[in-house]
Image (tube, rainbow, N blue to C red):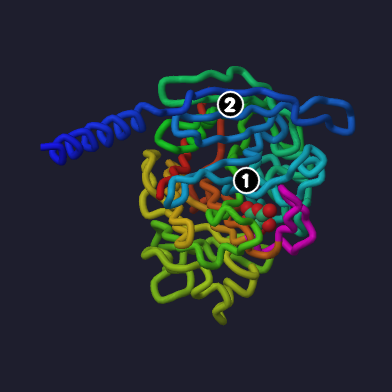
Amino acid sequence: MKKVFVVILSVLLLYSAGSCKSNNKAESKIEKSVFGKLADGSQVDAYVLKNTNGMTAKIITYGAVVVSLTAPDKSGKYEDVVLGYDNIEGYAADRAYFGAIVGRYGNRIARGKMTIDGKEYQLAINNPPNSLHGGVVGFNKKIWTVDGANVTKNGPAITMTLVSNDGEENYPGTVKLKVVYTLTNNDELSIVYTGATDKTTVLNPTNHSYFNLSGDMNNTILDHEVMIAADKTTPVDRGLIPLGNFADVAGTPMDFRTAKKIGRDINADYEQLKIAGGYDHNWAMNTYDKKVRLIATVYEPNSGRFMKVLSDQPGVQFYTGNFLDGRVKGKNGVMYKKRSGLCLEAQHYPDSPNKPQFPTTLLKPGEIYHQTTIYKFSH
Ligand code: BGC
């Protein structure tokens, strides 16, 4: 009898512990602080978004940069999974675009030239011989305005806006871009962009976070297993500009249709990999009907962390940190070496303004640019 009583009591205790756990959600909140000051004295603020699971995203007004993002490992432990810097000086000097919203045109435009409505524009050549990520002072080097920071029913959200003036970096038209970051209670970082212009221009922003799901940035990403839902890539020339054709990934090291370790083929004797020093290419997604769908996944076997990338964009630039060289001091003093992070930048194909066969990146007055991209974490 006594034994039965003990068993019943233990079951009751276990049950109440379990239900306690499920109610034991953290409070969703947003905390604002001063991140630092730029050399010209302007202040950069930081917002830490925390969801009900305890996941956090730290976002600063400079470049709308995601400074840190925590994700759960197989034991439920949340650790930072993105590369970045400890302070504003790091971001002001940054040339790797860690965590930033890049624009006006993410990735490259050949020789910085484009023609819109019969007029030729010469953009800055900041990645010779091409223009990269919006030029010398791209969206990543601007202070964004915070239009709202609220805990919504989906999770904490911050709305950031930027006005890019007519003629800035030689692009035509005043562009207004709004980015809403939401850290949902399903452990997703959702990024929703809307934009408009007053003169025909191009707009192709993306988020440039470098992920390392191991949580220890001393590790490389070579063991990460990646899937990309695309049958084709857009092969590039030596300046990483698409040649204009589409190549089947089947039977090549570019085939990520079934998840495989990044390190499996990265050093293969394959011209496209040699040109880029690893993966730094655009994958053309199999479907493009402006609906959000799964475009890629990443799994890190030691931590058990899993990331899904969902987006409505036609392409994704998969970049394996080939240009990191151990000379940049990142968070916690870690020197970021080659392949210590990977980017999956949802966007339009590089050099679309000069490739009429690619989906257009033109934005006309009266039209609304829209993008939704979601990084969803689990284990
Ligand atoms: C590009 C790389 C470039 C990197 C900048 C990526 O989007 O594809 O070639 O080096 O951004 O850090």
Q: Could you tell whether 24 is left or right of 12 in the image? A: right
- Along the line of sight, the residue nearer the viewer: 71 or 360: 71
Please name the residue shown 73% across and 45% down the image: 85
Report x, y in % for residue 194: 53, 28
Label 2 SS: strand
Is the residue at mark 2 in contact range of ligand 1, meaning its CB lies under 8 Å from it? no
The image quadrant in which ligand 1 is located = bottom right
Residue 101 in view of the camera: no
Rendered image quadrant of residue 257:
bottom left
Residue lying farthest left?
Answer: 1
Rendered image quadrant of residue 139:
top right
On residue 106, the disc is: 1
Q: Earlier in the sequence, mark 2 or mark 1?
A: 1
Q: Amino acid at mark 1?
A: Gly
Report x, y in % for residue 143: 74, 29
Is the residue at mark 1 in contact range of ligand 1, meaning its CB lies under 8 Å from it? yes
Question: Mark 2: few, some, or many residues within 10 Å (few <14, many ≥20)?
Answer: many
Residue 341 in view of the camera: yes
Question: Mark 1: few, some, or many residues within 10 Å (few <14, many ≥20)?
Answer: many
Label 1 SS: loop
Q: Amino acid at mark 2?
A: Lys
Report x, y in % for residue 242: 58, 61
What range is drawn magenta here? 321-336
- For residue 290, above or below residue 20: below
- Along the line of sight, the residue nearer the viewer: 38 or 274: 38
- Along the line of sight, the residue nearer the viewer: 322 or 178: 322
Q: Could you tell whether 231 is left or right of 205 in the image? A: left
**In this figure, which residue is indicated by the disc labeled 2?**
178
Q: Find out whether residue 333 is within the magenta segment.
A: yes
Residue lying farthest bottom?
Answer: 269
Report x, y in % for residue 260: 43, 67
Please name the residue shown 41% across and 46% down the image: 378
